[in-house]
Image (cartoon, helix red, strand yellow):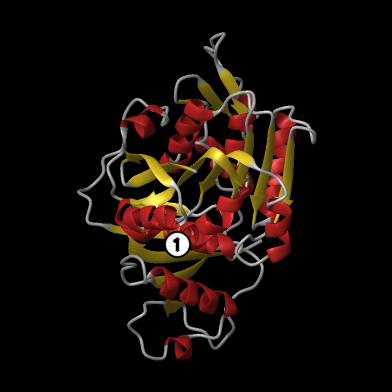
């Protein structure tokens, strides 16, 4: 099988927003090529003696992904420019996927500099892409005592107080390696006890749901807009021996589905966690407040520093009191209380 390789030029500050946008289009497993210096945590996870040399960061990045089903039609160019500076960008191509990406980039450009937004397409040979990424995901620790490990590895050096979580992310977001996930897990460690009920919005791989239950929460309700993510989440729950009586998973969009919201409000949750990007958190926050119990905590991340004040305003406008504001590199995690 031949694959089409898509390379999208952008800026490093736009990478996470664009990856999220691509995920909504069903494009997963995006490779990020940039010159951002490695963090100490990333260095420890590379499992090599000699680290790669990285040129000085110029702020540019490339996102690479592969598509196997379909190709540009014969009238399409080998080069597509999705930048917002072109007056009639649709004239450059007729490929539906590229058109949807262009629209997504235009939306992202309202929040952050996306750079040129140029997309190059080339053909590549067959590779086992479904399993190749496993080379780069290994066992690691989060917070005080949480150990994240994939199914193809055996966790070592486990202490008696450690909580082991088995995660196979597949196409779903959330392995614990990203700053936003780590921040949310660390906050859950502060507030979860055996009496709490958890609501996990945008659950992805269900890593936060699993962490909360293993920390002692008595029940969790997890929702994601993506059916594929929910399927991956269910598999991860099974791997961690979490039953249907302990957690409920559902596909849905709280921003659009009023019936889902009404169903949600029948229960009160002691902790609501949402690891979603800031443009979604702003309209989502007032929607979840009725489901949060008095004295309950709202933990939200996926927020770049530049948009933190916007989310804080949404939190305060919804009647919640900000409790903490924690940063990890360029990412922010906010905790508020009702």
Q: Which corner quadrant holds the N terminus?
A: bottom right
Up-down relation of residue 194 to residue 197 (above or below): above
Counting from the top left corner in percent of width and height, residue 140 is at 48, 26
- Kindly identify the residue that appears in the image at 52 percent across and 23 percent down: 146
Query: On the rendered structure, is 241 left or right of 78?
Result: right
* Residue furthest left as drawn: 56
Could you tell me residue 267's position as x and y percent?
70, 45
Does 306 sit above or below residue 112? above
Name above or below for residue 161 compared with residue 283.
Answer: above
Quick check: can you spot residue 212?
yes
Determine whether, in the image, residue 212 is placed left or right of residue 247. Answer: left
What residue is drawn where x is 58% and y is 79%? 96
Please give the name of the residue rendered at 68% of the width and 37% of the height, measured from the top-left corner: 220
Seen from the viewer's position, the closer of residues 118 and 255 is 255
Left of 40 or right of it: where is 194?
right
Q: Is residue 167 shown left or right of residue 98?
A: right
> Which secondary structure lies at badge 1?
helix
The residue beneath circle 1 is: 279
x, y percentage for residue 21?
A: 50, 63
Quadrant in which residue 175 is drawn: top right
Count of numbered tags: 1
């Amino acid at each position: 099988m031949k694959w089409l390789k898509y390379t999208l030029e952008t800026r490093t500050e736009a990478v996470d927003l664009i990856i999220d946008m691509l995920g909504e289009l069903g494009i997963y497993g995006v490779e990020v090529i940039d010159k951002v210096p490695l963090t100490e945590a990333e260095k420890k996870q590379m499992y090599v003696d000699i680290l790669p040399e990285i040129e000085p960061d110029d702020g540019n990045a490339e996102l690479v992904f592969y598509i196997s089903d379909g190709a540009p039609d014969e009238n399409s160019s080998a080069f597509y420019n999705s930048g917002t500076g072109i007056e009639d960008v649709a004239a450059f191509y007729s490929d539906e996927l590229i058109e949807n990406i262009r629209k997504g980039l235009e939306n992202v450009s309202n929040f952050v500099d996306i750079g040129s937004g140029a997309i190059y397409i080339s053909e590549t040979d067959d590779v086992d892409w479904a399993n190749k990424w496993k080379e780069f995901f290994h066992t690691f620790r989060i917070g005080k005592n949480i150990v994240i490990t994939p199914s193809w590895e055996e966790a070592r050096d486990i202490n008696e107080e450690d909580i082991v979580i088995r995660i196979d992310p597949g196409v779903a977001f959330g392995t614990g390696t990203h700053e936003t996930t780590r921040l949310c897990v660390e906050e859950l460690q502060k507030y979860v006890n055996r009496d709490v009920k958890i609501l996990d919005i945008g659950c992805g791989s269900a890593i936060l749901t699993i962490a909360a239950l293993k920390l002692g929460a008595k029940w969790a309700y997890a929702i994601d807009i993506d059916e594929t993510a929910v399927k991956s989440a269910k598999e991860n729950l099974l791997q961690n021996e979490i039953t249907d009586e302990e957690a409920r998973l559902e596909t849905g969009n709280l921003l659009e589905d009023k019936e889902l919201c009404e169903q949600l409000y029948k229960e009160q949750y002691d902790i609501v966690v949402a690891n979603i990007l800031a443009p979604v958190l702003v309209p989502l926050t007032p929607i979840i407040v009725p489901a949060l119990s008095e004295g309950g905590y709202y933990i939200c991340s996926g927020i770049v520093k530049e948009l933190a004040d916007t989310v804080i305003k949404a939190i305060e406008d919804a009647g919640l009191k900000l409790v903490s504001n924690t940063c990890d590199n360029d990412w922010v995690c906010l905790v508020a209380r009702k």
